[in-house]
Image: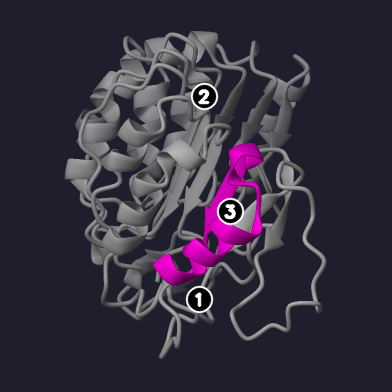
């Protein structure tokens, strides 16, 4: 699976793409500044306009004081250039965006750049510049830097990658985010830079820095079984409402660990779609939890495997390259 479509909504608002520089001025009627999540992007290849220039046009055309959500789409040459200029432009405009509460960096689809090719950078200046931010998302793990931070008001953090570097995992896990209610990490595979181990997730699983966490996604991972074994006794699970372990290489071993570990019947939902769990164990898991009122998505989805002549079986995460 690849990411084939741009965000249709973000931070509870419909996404609206700010017109490109070559769009006639009367061709597009702009919505009210506060009514949409504004997507600002330029061509990923051979762009005639740089992203900061498009953003400057946006600030001129829209009452930025009322803007609630921004989506950063492609910047020029995303496959080889970090968004340093993008981040600098956003930070420089912080006083012009007093109502900004949602920010997504890298709404980039496969036709523009493979997720594992997206070059990122240090995203922490954005969190420092916008202390009232409630939701932050980033796509792409290549060269992603996410040091440990403290943010008092962030409620939702999403990091989508084909491979999340261990240093970034440790930074996220070591962050103090007392208001965080939703954390969603696509950990990916070692082939694309996802080199963390379950031990690197220990602060998240302990939940000490995340007292408000209610939704946890640790997914799209080749170590999904190890994650499930850890979740079976992780203190954070007891206060979760929604647990997402989907899109990864989850097998009978991980599913059995969930069944034999701490109770999950308090959950509102459990998502493990795209898995390699056998039908018998999948049925047991679904039956046990649905009987307690838990919504369970246990579909295999598009999970596929390859078997070589020597019996070696290759299984794949949902989103890699």
- How packed mark 3 is, by other alpha carbons closer than 10 Å (few <14, some 14-19, many 20 or more), is many
The residue lying at 58 percent from left, 59 percent from top is 60
Residue 179 is left or right of residue 282, and the answer is left
Element marked by disc 1: loop
Task: Assign a secondary structure to mark 2.
Answer: loop
Q: Are marks 2 and 1 in contact (CB under 8 Å)?
A: no
- Give the label, 3 or 1, closer to the camera: 1
Of pointers 3 and 2, the one earlier in the residue sequence: 2
Determine which quarter of the picture holds residue 261.
Answer: top left
| Quadrant showing the N terminus | bottom right
- Residue at 26% x, 77% y is 80
Q: Are marks 3 and 1 in contact (CB under 8 Å)?
A: no
The location of residue 150, given as percent across then percent down, is: 29, 21
Residue hosting label 3: 274
Q: Is residue 240 above or below residue 222?
A: above
Figure check: 115 above or below 149: below
Q: Which residue is mark 1?
A: 42
- Seen from the viewer's position, the closer of residues 252 and 264 is 264
What range is drawn magenta here? Answer: 52-74
Neighbours of disc 2 within 10 Å: few (<14), some (14-19), many (20+): many
Find disc 2 in the rendering and name its residue: 155
Q: Is residue 219 left or right of residue 101?
A: left
């Amino acid at each position: 699976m690849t990411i084939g479509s741009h965000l249709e909504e973000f931070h509870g608002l419909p996404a609206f793409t700010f017109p490109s520089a070559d769009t006639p001025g009367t061709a597009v009627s702009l919505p009210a500044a506060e009514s949409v999540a504004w997507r600002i992007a330029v061509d990923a290849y051979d762009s005639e306009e740089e992203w900061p220039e498009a953003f400057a046009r946006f600030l001129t055309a829209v009452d930025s004081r009322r803007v609630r959500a921004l989506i950063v789409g492609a910047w020029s040459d995303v496959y080889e250039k970090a968004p340093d200029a993008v981040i600098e432009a956003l930070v420089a405009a912080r006083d012009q965006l007093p109502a900004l509460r949602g920010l997504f960096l890298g709404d980039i689809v496969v036709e523009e750049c493979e997720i594992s090719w997206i070059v990122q950078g240090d995203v922490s200046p954005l969190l420092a510049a916008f202390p009232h931010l409630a939701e932050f998302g980033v796509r792409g793990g290549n060269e992603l830097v996410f040091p440990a931070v403290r943010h008092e008001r962030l409620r939702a953090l999403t990091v989508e990658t084909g491979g999340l570097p261990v240093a970034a995992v440790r930074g996220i896990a070591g962050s103090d985010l007392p208001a965080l209610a939703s954390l969603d990490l696509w950990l990916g595979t070692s082939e694309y830079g996802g080199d963390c181990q379950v031990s690197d997730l220990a602060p998240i699983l302990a939940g000490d820095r995340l007292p408000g966490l209610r939704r946890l996604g640790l997914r799209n991972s080749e170590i999904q079984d190890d994650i499930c074994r850890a979740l079976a006794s992780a203190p954070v699970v007891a206060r979760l409402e929604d647990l997402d372990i989907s899109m990864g290489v989850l097998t009978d071993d991980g599913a059995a660990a969930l069944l034999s570990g701490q109770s999950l019947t308090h959950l509102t939902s459990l998502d493990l779609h795209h898995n390699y769990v056998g039908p018998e164990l999948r049925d047991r898991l679904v039956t046990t939890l649905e009987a307690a009122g838990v919504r369970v998505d246990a579909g295999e989805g598009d999970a596929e495997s390859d078997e070589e002549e020597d019996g070696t079986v290759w299984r794949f995460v949902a989103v890699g390259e």
